[in-house]
Image: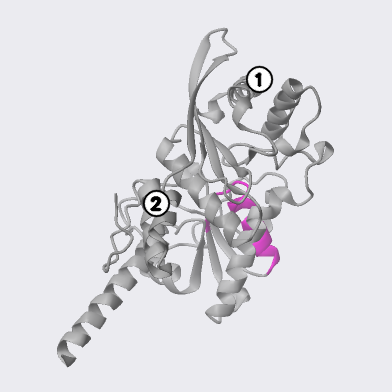
Amino acid sequence: MPNALVDDIREIKEANPFESMMSRFDRAAQLLQLDPDLYAVMRVPNRELKVYIPTRMDSGRIQVFEGFRVQHNFARGPAKGGIRYSPDVTIEEVRALAAWMTWKCAVVNVPFGGAKGGIICDPTQMSMGELERMTRRYASELLDFIGPEKDVLAPDMNTNEQTMAWIMDTYSMHARHTVNAVVTGKPIDLGGSRGRREATGRGILIVVQEACKRFKMDPSNTRIVVQGSGNVGGIGALLMHEAGFKVVAISDVAVANGAPIVAITDSQLSPLAKDARVLFTVPEDEYTFSRSLAAPMCLVQCIAVATAAVLQPSRETAPRIPTVTEIARDRTVAESRKNRASKARSG
């Protein structure tokens, strides 16, 4: 088990989300001089659930999906956290996200602990009926562990208001009365909150605005590159455009992992209000990312949303842009080495 009370900053392992999260937690524990007993408790989740979800597919056959729910901490109240559907879901990722929810709830002082869930599936290859049957069976498997006083579920990647409605209905059928509070992010007609769908994207806007204040950047001259075009990236891009930022590129899962970021124009942003997953194109001569502009834009003039954008016209011709974490880590390590060298010379 890593030791929080270390002098050197350990390298953050981004390949494993849980190790990445714990590296930051270890560093925070060191800076806060966190009590060792509290550190030991907070470093592990309270409960981890793994369920298998038999689902009748449209073809008539049964497919068994693997699902998780991690409840990190209940000290401040019921656990709370989203559910994501993706082929890439892992228990390490869910475990890390549950812990992050604990930290977030504590920072904003809401009476919840952290939780997260996920199912290993490809929702893009499933019909609405298949998704409903899988979701309801997943909720049924969790019945003894979720509820308004236990664990409140929420939408996340590839889940939405409809997903929450299915979960709420399944839970309510077993409770024999309507239980709205078992989920957040549900439809307005079922007791959902107005603005919930846009809330995370609006949070991105607020963070970017505060960053501009800190670094004395003019929004009208600040270019934005968004990696991700769902409820966070897509809506965030639209809100930042409306706030006066120059949103120059956006990508989704089809053009991630080193593929070209798709450039957009102002007139093409409006469809985002209805469909946050729309991609946009413009003629190559209207806006081009060159190798010479890529790194300076990312580091100086461009705020990368969600994760640092890879600004490259092709895999072969352009360098990979370091992530925000890598940039911060490299700067911290460089400053630490500089300080050590300065002390050595003065000594």
| Residue 241 within the magenta-colored segment of the rendering | yes
Q: Position of residue 193 (x, y in %)?
A: 78, 47
Is residue 171 something one can see in this rendering? yes
Furthest residue to the top?
60
Furthest residue to the right?
189
Horizontal side of 217 relative to 274 (left or right) equals left
Q: Residues within 10 Å of mark 2 (few under 14, many from 20)?
A: few
Element at badge 2? helix
For marks 2 and 1, the one nearer the N-term is 2
Type of amino acid under label 1: Gly
| Residue 218 within the magenta-colored segment of the rendering | no
Horizontal side of 177 relative to 24 (left or right) equals right
Q: Position of residue 139 (x, y in %)?
A: 62, 26
What is the number of the mark on residue 336?
none
Q: Position of residue 104 (x, y in %)?
A: 57, 56
Q: Is residue 245 shown above or below 73? A: below
Please tell me which residue lies in front, 112 or 55: 112
Furthest residue to the bottom?
346
Q: Position of residue 105 (x, y in %)?
A: 60, 55
- For disc 1, the marked residue is 129
Q: Residue at x 62, y 75 (%)?
A: 220
Q: Residue at x 41, y 53 (%)?
A: 21
- For disc 2, the marked residue is 40
Q: Is residue 57 shown above or below 44? A: above
Q: Is residue 46 shown above or below 338? A: above
Q: Which residues are magenta?
A: 226-243
Q: Residue at x 60, y 43 (%)?
A: 79
Please tell me which residue lies in front, 182 or 29: 29
Q: Residues within 10 Å of mark 1 (few under 14, many from 20)?
A: few
